[in-house]
Amino acid sequence: MDFGLAGGPTAASTSEGLWHHGEVRTLLLIASSFAASLVEMVEALTIVLAVGVTKGWRTAMTATMTALVSLLAIIVVLGPLLSKLPLPVLRLAIGALLLVFGLQWLRKAILRASGHKAQHDEAQIFADEVAALGDATSRADRIDGAGFAVAFKGVLLEGLEVAFIVVTFGATQHRVGVAALGALAAVIVVVIAGLALHRPLARVPENSLKMVVGIMLTSFGMYWAGEGVGAAWPGGDLALLGVIAWTSLVTGISVATLRVRIPVMA
Amino acid sequence: MTEKRQKGLASRFASGLWDFFVGDDWVLAIGVAVVLGVAGLISGMTGSWWVLVLGIPGVLTISLLRAVRLRR
């Protein structure tokens, strides 16, 4: 059984038990989309809250809605375009992009976990944003230009990463809807938490989540790019689980080595 | 729109694209391209999955060591 893309049997055709009806890959797809979206939405929420507190909620909400509509337009245009590309080209292009993207996340996560980069701190980022935006001098009934720009840019840029992950993950498996479900669940969780708390979600284990997402993006990227360049994976689709395990092992060894062998300079 | 403003917008757009896809370290992007190129070249002769399995962690290691060295 393959991912439903190749149109032919793979070496893993006999591994029905573990891979039956693609449950494992569906779960991986939803979990990856959820985790990636959760991290990005938490970051976007921090910026929107900072703008809301300093420049008024009308500015923050208008900018957020405008950015979300822009994102929707990008997804609506990009999604169908991607599905029209020939399969090998799609696999190679998306695999390469996922790899570059995933390695960026993984690099930052490893440096943070080993103490070579400051941990991501939403409370500190919120305080910095509020200080940068200045006093709450804007009237609540009008839209503040600077506040709008900050909130719009924050939601659009963080949202673009989510859109990229959802569209690429989904497109390679012809399951954009499944990937979008994971992202939607994350958006709902963050919006409800944000409305309830009215402060940054500092308790979300962002740094750990980023590491997990980095591992998933890199593993999926390696697998798809490999398929795209004609590398025949041993075990067919089951090789993806091996690639995830291998990437996790490399990540753990990297963190331990950087932490022990290369101490942080004061 | 003046020519200067157009150039500024184009420059910011290019910079945004670079940040989005290449990020903090260009070595990652170049390394991925090289590993995929090698894997593609030898895939006709032999199974090249091992090039990815060894090459991608290698690229990550080089990038991490660069980051640590730059920081020190």
Image (cartoon, helix red, strand yellow):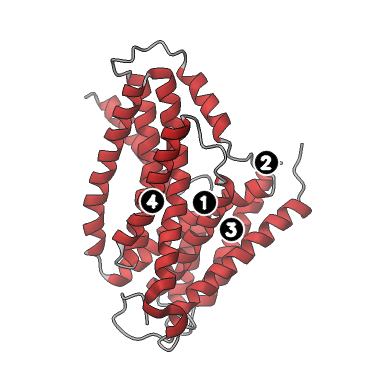
Q: Please report the residue visible at 33 percent of the width from the left and 15 percent of the height from the top.
A: A140
Q: Chain of mark 3?
A: B
Q: Measured along the vertical axis of the image, is residue A214 above or below residue A135?
A: below
Expressed as whole percent of the image width and height from the top left, the position of residue A200 reads 50, 33
For the residues labelled 2 and 4, the Cα–Cα distance comes to 38 Å
Earlier sequence position, callout 4 versus callout 1: 1
Dot 2: what SS? helix
Dot 4: what SS? helix
- Which is more foreground, mark 3 or mark 4? 4
Q: Which mark is residue B60?
A: 3
Q: Which residue ends up furthest to the front in the rendered image? A: A196
Say what amino acid the circle numbered 2 marks.
Arg
The reply, left or right, for residue A119 in relation to residue A53 is right
Earlier sequence position, callout 3 versus callout 2: 3
Quarter holding residue A212: bottom right
Q: Chain of mark 2?
A: B
For the residues labelled 3 and 4, the Cα–Cα distance comes to 31 Å
Q: Chain of mark 4?
A: A
The reply, left or right, for residue A200 in relation to residue B1 is right
Q: Which residue ends up furthest to the bottom in the rendered image? A: A14
